[in-house]
Image (cartoon, rainbow, N blue to C red):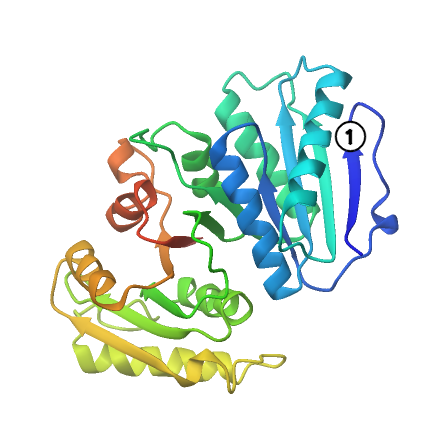
Amino acid sequence: MTKISSQLSEFIGSLPETQHAQSAAGALLVGYNRGARAQTALQSALAIGHETGRRVRVLSILDADASKDEALETLSRIKEMVSQNATVPDAVYADVHKMSAHFDDEEYGRARSFIEASVSFNASLIVLGVHEGDKPLSGTMTEKLLKEAICPVLISTGQANKNYRQAMIAVEFAPFMELALETLEWLAPESEVHLVHALEDAKLKLPGTSGKKKDGDSVNAEIASLIATHRNKPGSSASGTSFDKYTTCVEPAKPVELLEQQIKEIGPDLFITGTRARTGLSKFVLGSVATRFIDKPPCDLLVIKES
């Protein structure tokens, strides 16, 4: 029986965490408001929770001056959406919080609230919906969240299949690849993995190396080494899963062009990329590859922040 618990911070107090039926795995954290984008994200999070056995935390952040009635109405909508969904995990918790009054930038305030909640709830993944129409990413909560999120962020396109079968990774190296492999292990354990790396401007990042550009053989060897290291980690269940059936594409090319070509050929249902969270002009904030695919993802997009 699915459990739907409520927590209305600053309205009726907090439900103690000890009352929750916790699993050892980190929760999926999904934002909710009245928009279609949020509904897509919630449906996706519920489907992923059902597939992976992880609990789902639904977080709605209201304005600082919101009333208790607004919070209760929001909670009611969340419960109704969950009850109408065909694939629901064993534990779903709805949290309605007021945003701190000192945030002048509401988008930043909501992003900070999500980041704090992701730590509090031990989130292993934040789930968002894709932006609607041609709305630019710059200045939005999504951009601010991607710059600072501690855990990976999944941008859902609304595709029905969450039992991912074809996963494609835009390969960067440690620590990005370590977290990408760890997330992929539980999120898409049965997928065929396609690792794509453009050689243009790719330099060795290992300590003590000369900084010379890599060639295809060295990149393929490093990918194989990373996967072997991950599979041999204590507690890893990667042996016998998708890492037995991975392919690589390492070619001299512009990264975005090579990735777009491979997306057309492979047709992935999950695409994984990193973001360096740069500062400055908006087009440089997340890096060219991340910016290109976040605005209009070809399928569900997993974004992992590179440290």
Q: Is residue 261 left or right of residue 191?
A: left
Q: Residue 65 placed where, x, y %?
A: 67, 12
Instruction: Give the class, few, some or many, for how many residues have Cα within 10 Å of label 1's Cα (few <14, many ≥20).
Output: some
Q: Which structural element holds mark 1?
A: strand
Q: Residue 201 placed where, x, y %?
A: 16, 60
Between 209 and 204, the one nearer to me in the picture: 204
Q: Residue 22 placed where, x, y %?
A: 78, 58
Between 26 and 218, the one nearer to me in the picture: 26
Would residue 173 be seen by someone viewing this image from the given angle?
no
Would residue 50 be seen by someone viewing this image from the given angle?
yes
Q: Count the numbered circles shown.
A: 1
184 shown above or below 271? below
Between 40 and 193, the one nearer to me in the picture: 40
Q: Residue at coordinates 57% horizontally, 43% vertically from top-left? A: 42
Q: Quadrant of the N terminus?
A: bottom right
Q: Quadrant of the C terminus?
A: bottom left
Q: Is residue 122 left or right of residue 72?
A: left
Where does label 1 land, which residue? 8
Q: Residue at coordinates 43% horizontally, 80% vertically from top-left? A: 243
Picture quadrant of residue 72: top right
Q: Residue at coordinates 37% horizontally, 69% vertically from top-left? A: 166
Q: Residue at coordinates 64% horizontally, 32% vertically from top-left? A: 60
Name the amino acid, label 1: Leu
194 shown above or below 129? below
Between 263 and 160, the one nearer to me in the picture: 160
Q: Is residue 3 left or right of residue 88?
A: right
200 shown above or below 99? below
Q: Residue 103 placed where, x, y %?
A: 57, 19
